[in-house]
Amino acid sequence: MTREEVYERLNAVFADVFDDEELTVNDETTAADVEGWDSLIHITLIDAVEEEFDISFDMKTIVKLKNVGEMVDVILEEAN
């Protein structure tokens, strides 16, 4: 899976979770950049990402994520 393929699927997840079809994310996107991204939505988002990519993040990894780019890195590691 390429980084571009991950972003294609990840953008669909973000659009669904945040109910915003115009929302697109990139490597530098953080919670501060997305309206409504709070701790409760974060749990929903992580769950949706895990389901979409058939992976499971451990809590240590989730806490360390600083931006969407780091999430993509973990997805790519898990997918390979």
Image (cartoon, grey):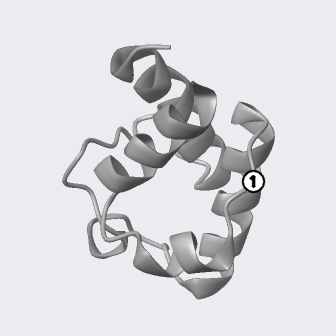
Q: Position of residue 49 (x, y in %)?
A: 66, 46
Residue at position x 73%, y 48% from top? 50
Going by the image, does 44 lie left or right of 5?
right
Identify the residue at the far left of this view: 28
How many marks the image carries: the answer is: 1
At which x and y percent is residue 20?
A: 52, 45
**Left or right: 41 with respect to 14?**
right
Looking at the image, residue 77 lies above or below residue 7: below
Q: Where is residue 1 in the image (x, y as percent from the top left)?
A: 50, 14
**Tag 1: amino acid:** Ser
Q: Relative to 4, is 68 above or below?
A: below
**Residue at figure coordinates x 76%, y 58% from the top left:** 47
Q: If the image is split into quadrants, where does the C terminus sit?
A: top right
- Taking the view exactly as shown, the residue that stands out farthest to the bottom is 39
Looking at the image, residue 21 sits to the left or right of residue 57; the answer is left
Q: In this view, does 19 lie above or below 44?
A: above
Q: In which quarter of the image is residue 72?
A: top left
What residue would you read off at disc 1?
Answer: 56
Identify the residue at horizontal 34%, vertical 54% (top origin). Answer: 70
- 71 or 10: nearer the viewer: 71
80 left or right of 5 in image:
right
Residue closest to the eye, 76 or 23: 76
Q: Position of residue 11 (x, y in %)?
A: 48, 34
| Mark 1 Cα-neighbour bin, 10 Å: few <14, some 14–19, many ≥20 | some
Residue 52 vertical placement versus 34 (above, below): above
Circle 1 SS class: loop
Q: Residue at x 48, y 25 (%)?
A: 6
Question: Which of 49/55 is in front?
Answer: 55
